[in-house]
Amino acid sequence: MSILDKLKKNSTIKDTAILKDSHFFTKKDMIPTSIPVINVALSGRLDGGLTPGLTMWAGPSKHFKTAFSLLMAKSYLEKYADAALLFYDSEFGTPQSYFDSFGIDTDRVIHTPITDVEQLKFDIMKQLADINRGEHVIIVIDSIGNLASKKEVEDALNEKAVADMSRAKQMKSLFRMVTPHLTMKDIPMVVVNHTYKEIGMFPKDIVGGGTGSYYSADNIFILGRQQQKEGTQISGYNFIINVEKSRYVKEKSKIPVSVSFDGGISKWSGLLDIALESGHVIKPSNGWYQKVDMDSGEVIDGKFRMKDTETADFWKSILTHKDFYDYVKNRYSVAATSIIKDEDITDAIEAMEDYE
């Protein structure tokens, strides 16, 4: 028996395996959404998407955090006909009509109201302990931003006006406990959170809830927004997904997404900015756009206004071109490169031994 076989046989952990055979390190399940730039934010690829583990959407109020979370849940439920959505609700700002607008069958949603961090921790751990690998569940928590601790609630009931020092500790405990279950059982969990401004001359957005989420999360996105206007009327928002942390995408990347009041999330949003960077689209004059044949370098198909670029006909030839796919992947994804350069320093080491 080899030492490898002996170590594997003697382990008391049933999932112990030689690394190359371990199902925890095989290709991860990836669920693409219907919005290409959301796939880019999640994976660095146009055809990528949501993976098991913790993904967090953070930002101020009314920054579409819940909507992005439900978009991902909808994609998961579409991929797996037997899947269920476990929805933890602390804000009660998501009526059934909101699920309906995303095409989510509410018969497949378990709605669990929560009032404090400990209640969430106890319930979610009980659920995770009873889920087996291969069972399809996606978890959404909306939200942890304003979720109180049990002590804070009890102090209020007892009319105690003391500072609560337990919330950050309980939040860290929550994420520490759920993280291995998410990975080992291939469960994606999407969490909505709030941000606050750092004190200083140039304040930046800080994700609430302490360091627990930072340590555990695979993805943390901080949302910013700008108004869209038609004349003097606000017609929607241009959101910027700021990649605060990611295991798959270059951190500090900024990915634009457009949302209009009458049309919802634009399927093609963000692509125009990327195509202008890559050279697949040019802007010959203000307000006009033209496609470029990257094989010949010639301008093709005439001129388009911005609203006319938001069609499948406009994007099909670009999205199916390998150069554009490769540009996006190289621009956003984290490359797997060698940590240590393969250089032979045997002679130098032998020379050092002569110093002894």
Image: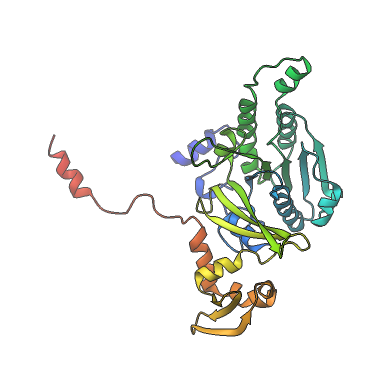
The residue shown at (45%, 55%) is 336
Residue 87: where, in percent of width, then height? 77, 42
Work out whether residue 1 can be spotted: no
Q: Which part of the image, by quadrant, shows the C terminus? A: top left
Count the labels in the image: 0
> Image check: 247 left or right of 80?
left
Q: Position of residue 25 (x, y in %)?
A: 55, 49
- 306 is higher (above) or lower (below) than 56: below
Q: Position of residue 82 (x, y in %)?
A: 79, 52
At 70% from the left and 44% from the top, the residue drawn is: 61
Residue 292 seen in the current view: yes
On the image, which quarter does residue 290 sit in? Answer: bottom right
The residue at the point 75 percent across, 19 percent down is 156
Q: Position of residue 285 (x, y in %)?
A: 55, 77
Relative depth, front residue between 92 and 112:
92
* The quarter of the displayed image where residue 37 is located: bottom right
Q: Is residue 347 left or right of residue 207?
A: left
217 horizontally vs 312: left or right? left
Task: Tell me which residue sits at (51%, 50%) in the image.
Answer: 20
- Residue projecting furthest to the front: 232
